């Protein structure tokens, strides 16, 4: 039993270590950014921006003059105005707020890791019943995992005679 517990913990921690490397940040990587790089990002040519949005401005003017036109109507009548414009780029990233995430973290993880505090955070940030329900399921799953680990530790300590 103890051997299985140790193997399970080793697998868990190795998985945790491999996934957490994506969040790693080192001092050497921060020194790689120079002042020239910062200026290249912050200084831009305004005329390039207006040129890039010329197609969008023409489409906006056309839609303002022709109220009630859809994407398919415009593509049938004046398809040259839609150069570089896709029908899917105007779609919202979420569907009606149903998939709204609290700080970009899934609600299940909020509940699983932080318990009732995570549920409260999800409820206050999203004010969405579906997301709060997912946080509740995460809280229940996290509690079940904690209880299972506790039971395994108690069983292992009872069999080996050690106390935790």
Image (tube, rainbow, N blue to C red):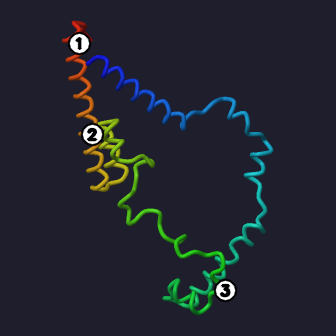
Q: Which quarter of the rendered picture does the C terminus lie within?
A: top left
Q: Quadrant of residue 89?
A: bottom right
Residue plotted at (21% across, 17% down): 154
* Quadrant of the frame with the N terminus: top left
**Residue 138 in the image, given as x and y percentages of width and height:** 29, 42
Q: Nearer the viewer, residue 23 or 151?
A: 151
Q: Residue at x 63, y 30 (%)?
A: 26
Q: Is residue 24 above or below residue 94?
A: above
Q: Which residue is mark 1?
A: 157
**Residue 113 in the image: x percent, y percent?**
34, 36
Dot 1 alpha-carbon crowd within 10 angstroms: few under 14, some 14 to 19, many 20 or more: some
| Residue where numbered disc 2 is placed | 139
Tell me the crowding category of disc 2: few under 14, some 14 to 19, or many 20 or more residues within 10 angstroms, Cα based. many
User: What is the CA distance from the residue labelled 2 to the residue labelled 1?
Assistant: 27 Å
* x and y, in percent, of residue 59 in the image: 62, 82
Secondary structure of the residue carrying tag 1 is helix
Where disc 3 sits, the SS reads helix
Residue underneath mark 3: 80
Image position of 84 (left or right of 33):
left
Mark-to-mark CA distance, 1 and 3 = 75 Å
Give the Cα distance between marks 2 and 3.
Answer: 53 Å
């Amino acid at each position: 039993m103890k051997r299985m517990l140790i193997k399970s913990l080793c697998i868990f921690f190795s998985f945790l270590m491999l996934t957490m490397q994506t969040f790693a940040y080192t001092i050497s990587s921060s020194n790689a950014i120079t002042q020239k790089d910062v200026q290249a990002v912050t200084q831009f040519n305004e005329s390039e921006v207006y040129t890039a949005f010329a197609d969008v401005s023409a489409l906006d003017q056309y839609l303002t003059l022709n109220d009630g036109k859809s994407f398919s109507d415009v593509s049938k009548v004046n398809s040259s105005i839609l150069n570089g414009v896709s029908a899917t780029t105007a779609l919202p990233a979420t569907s009606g707020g149903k998939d709204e995430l609290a700080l970009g973290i899934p609600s299940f993880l909020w509940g699983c890791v932080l318990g009732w505090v995570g549920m409260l955070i999800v409820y206050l940030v999203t004010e969405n019943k579906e997301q709060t329900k997912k946080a509740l399921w995460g809280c229940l799953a996290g509690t079940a995992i904690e209880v299972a680990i506790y039971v395994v530790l108690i069983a292992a300590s009872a069999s080996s005679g050690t106390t935790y």
